[in-house]
Image (cartoon, rainbow, N blue to C red):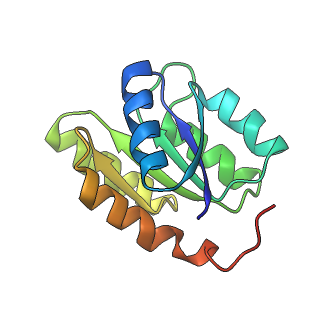
Amino acid sequence: MPDILLVDDDPSFADYMTTLLRRDGHRVTCVDSGEQALDHLSAHACQVVITDVLMPDMDGIELLREIGRRGHDVAVIGITGADLALNDLVARLFEAMGAAFVTPKPIEPKEFLARLARHAARFRSEPAA
């Protein structure tokens, strides 16, 4: 399974997602800011980044742009807690910028894990770093 970097400034949601992902067999590292995510990516191999879209300082869109600019080969998944109209706009923007997908909060666990598995499948044959 791919290594996952979870980026979320809400400790309770980050704990929930970490538990969900680990129970599904994933290796998860959690950070609470875009800057910490970029530092982690510079020092550690990871295949999937799951990021909150709306965060202080560096939001998920800025993080996605910086991941691409720095040439990190990772699948990026956005999570947003915005209202429904904004969720659609954010999803289209995020996906146009190269994200794998965006999902709204609250997360539907089975659907989220199934989508994650589809997008992470390309890493299954790669050796662990």
**Residue 120 seen anywhere in this rendered image of the structure:** yes
**Residue drawn 67% across and 55% down?**
68
Q: Position of residue 35 (x, y in %)?
A: 68, 28
**Residue drawn 43% across and 55% down?**
24
Quadrant of the image occupied by residue 37: top right
Q: Is residue 47 above or below residue 121?
A: above
In the figure, is residue 128 to the left or right of 47? right
Quadrant of the image occupied by residue 126: bottom right
Quadrant of the image occupied by residue 114: bottom left
**Residue drawn 56% across and 24% down?**
32
Q: Position of residue 99 (x, y in %)?
A: 49, 59
- Decide which of 108, 93 is in the foreground and name it: 108
- Decide which of 51, 114 is in the foreground and name it: 114
**Residue drawn 77% across and 51% down?**
70
Count the marks.
Answer: 0
Q: Position of residue 98 (x, y in %)?
A: 52, 62
In the figure, is residue 54 to the left or right of 71? left
In the figure, is residue 89 to the left or right of 43? left
Q: Quadrant of the C terminus?
A: bottom right
In the figure, is residue 105 to the left or right of 59? left
Q: Quadrant of the N terminus?
A: bottom right
**Residue 52 seen anywhere in this rendered image of the structure:** no
Q: Position of residue 117 (x, y in %)?
A: 43, 68
Farthest left residue in view:
84
